[in-house]
Amino acid sequence: MNTPAHPSPKQITGVWLLLVAATFVSWLLIEQHGISARIATTVALLIAGVKARLVLRQFMELRTAPWVFGALFDAWIVVFVGAIIAGYWIALH
Amino acid sequence: MSALGELVHVDLTNPALARRSAHRRLAGEPGVWVFIGADMAAFGLFFLIFTYGRAAHPALYEQSRQALNPTIGLLSTLFLITSGWLVALAVGAARSGDRGPARILLVLAMLVGSGFAVNKIIEYSAKISSGITMLTNEFFTYYFIFTGIHFIHFLIGMVALAACVSKARGEPSQARFLTWIESVACYWHMVDLLWIVLFPMLYLQL
Amino acid sequence: MSAIAPDMRATAPARPAPAVATASPTDISSEFNTWRFCAWMGPLFMAVFIVFWGVMGHNIPPWNPDLPATNVARWFRAEANTIRLGMVVAMTFTVCYAVWGLSIGRVMSRMVSRDSILIDLQVWGAGLTVVPVLVSTSFWLAGSFRPDALPDNVLQLLYDMAWLLIDLAYSVTSVQMFALGVAILKDKRKAPLIPRWFAWYGIWVGFMFIAECVMPFFKTGAFARDGVLNFWIEFMIWFVWVPGLTIFVLKAINRIQQEEQW
């Protein structure tokens, strides 16, 4: 078997650390008042999309599932997180 | 095997397929993914409804958002992410046949998860005692109902984790236990993932 | 007599007994046809309900609760006969939902043990679903009976009562869905009589209904009785569950007939 079927404890922990770090970054961006609100919000939402994808692909193991499921849930992220971001920018005008 | 069955589970008893395939399969029982898909579609719709409302009343939403505490939101997120990490480790232990460690990890996951519950109850109580309820305005309607429905999902997940803890000792069949723990883990990760989007949507949109 | 009876009860077979020796193949065939007929009562109920309750009764979607009482009153007075006809037909066919539930229960007896409480729960869930539908349709009917003699706010109350009942009675239907879902998941056949993914869909629908709990708190928006969530999503996911399940039930009955009648 050339494809590692399941994530190792090391990989899992690595993903967790990434998720924690990403969460802090988005929180800091918003709490820090030096950064433009628009950029902070947009980046925080994009980070959410990345975190969601990490959970889907690593924790929920879509990485080793039939590709169609990975594609479906990637589409979910693009559509719904995308809509939140789009709505945010529309609301600015 | 049905066409959908082929899509979700390659039959490894066929040697030709076993050699060729990378054994792509959905974690847990395939049917649980129908539940997960439906729930994610529903929450996706919640996100759209909120976004639409926010675009229509940005000043109201921003003013209301300021009554929320992003640090509490951060804590909630960290609790769920960490609980998810422990569940993922538990699944790994279960796969290696280590029922004891798997059980401990699941219990730890529940402990950390209950941190989310405590945090949420504190947050809700604080809002309600300062006179903010789901009837206060549109923002808070969505805040209470969407996080509330999410919280119910969380509670169901905790019950499912508890069932897994009991099965770690009580289920002799490795195949059946794995299906259980993988399915519950996928559901639990979904609960985590939905909060990952809810957090910035509600707390962090300036 | 009494000396033999307890022993005989103890050895009663758990699986359905083979066809009675004296029943002809035609009798058995006709039993299966009756069973299939009962299964068709589900989609029949749905179709009648959508046309007569839904369209003629102005319930797809319902009147927005924020509208003044005069709007609802005017509708009752202007459309009295349409509403009466819609409701009497809807009420007549409501029992079909219970009949359908019994046909499902019988399929369940081949998935789990014949005296499993899950079968009773599903049958009762389907049967009890009939009650709020019958009672609420009678309120709409009552409003259409002598609307000119009633004040606007009384007519509004009748309309509101009907909707509050039909929406908040959701848990009886949830019980039906959960019981069936669990039974499907307990089916030990290699190829289950009803596919497992459908069990999960039903369980999900049963849970989703809980959002109706906030309906009485809102007169506008997504959670009001005509809102995108509490009307459109909630009703559509139920509307598709009934025919979807019936397709699987009919297939299951055919399979059971093949297995048990040879």
Image (spheres, rainbow, N blue to C red):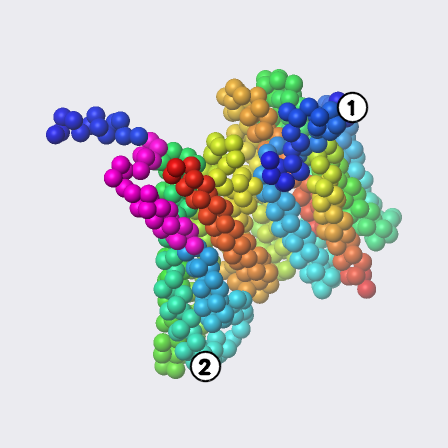
- Residue B195: which quarter of the image? top right
Residue named by callout 1? A2
Amino acid type, label 1: Asn
Pick the front one: C97 or B141: C97
**Image height of C115 relative to C74, above or below:** above
Disc 1 to disc 2, how far (Cα)?
73 Å
* Quadrant that contains the N terminus of chain C: top left
Q: Is residue B205 visible?
A: no
Residue that appears at 43% across and 54% down: C40
* CA neighbours of label 2 inside 10 A, class few (<14), some (14 to 19), many (20+): some
- In this picture, residue C175 sits left or right of residue C230: left
| Residue annotated with mark 2 | C78
- Check the residue under mark 1 and report the chain it is in: A
Query: At x 25% / y 39%, what residue is drawn?
Result: C22
On the rendered image, what quadrant is the C terminus of chain C found in?
top left
* Magenta segment boundaries in residue numbering: C14-40
**Percent position (x, y) of residue C106?**
38, 43
